[in-house]
Image: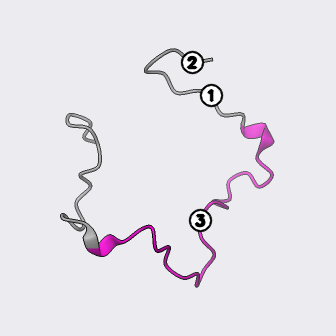
Amino acid sequence: MSTEGERPEIDLSRDPNPGVPDHAAPEGAEVDPLIDLSRDPNPGKADHAKPGEED
C-alpha cells in the first residue's frame, strides 16, 4: 500500500498486451459523448495540471 502522495506500483506482468495502448478507442470509433471538447474554455492549452507542475 502506498502512503499519501505516492503513486501505487502497477504490476506490468499482468498486462496481456505489453506496450500496446489497448485502452484507446478503436480506429474510426464514434466520439464519446461524455468528452465534449467544444466546451473547453482554453482549447489547445494544457491547463489541467495543478499550478507549479509544468514540464
Residue 22 place in picture, x, y as percent: 67, 61
Q: CA distance from mark 3 to mark 2?
A: 27 Å
Compared with 11, 19 (above or below) is below
Label 3: how many residues lie within 10 Å, few (<14), some (14-19) or many (20+)? Answer: few
Q: Which residue is mark 1?
A: 9
Element under disc 1: loop
Residue 24's mark? Answer: 3
In front of the other: 19 or 53: 53
Q: Amino acid at mark 1?
A: Glu
Element under disc 2: loop
Residue 1 place in picture, x, y as percent: 63, 17
Residue at the image point whose x is 26% and y is 38% from the top: 50
Residue 19 place in picture, x, y as percent: 68, 54
Q: Amino acid at mark 2?
A: Ser
Callout 2 touching callout 1 (CB < 8 Å): yes
Q: Write the start and end of the magenta stretch as one range.
A: 12-38
User: Left or right of 26: which side holds 16?
Assistant: right
Residue at the image point whose x is 45% and y is 68% from the top: 34
- Disc 3 or 1, which lies upstream in sequence? 1
- Disc 2 or 1, which lies upstream in sequence? 2
Label 1: how many residues lie within 10 Å, few (<14), some (14-19) or many (20+)? Answer: few
* Residue 53 magenta: no
Residue at the image point whose x is 42% and y is 68% from the top: 35
In front of the other: 6 or 35: 35
Q: Which residue is mark 2?
A: 2
Compared with 4, 13 (above or below) is below
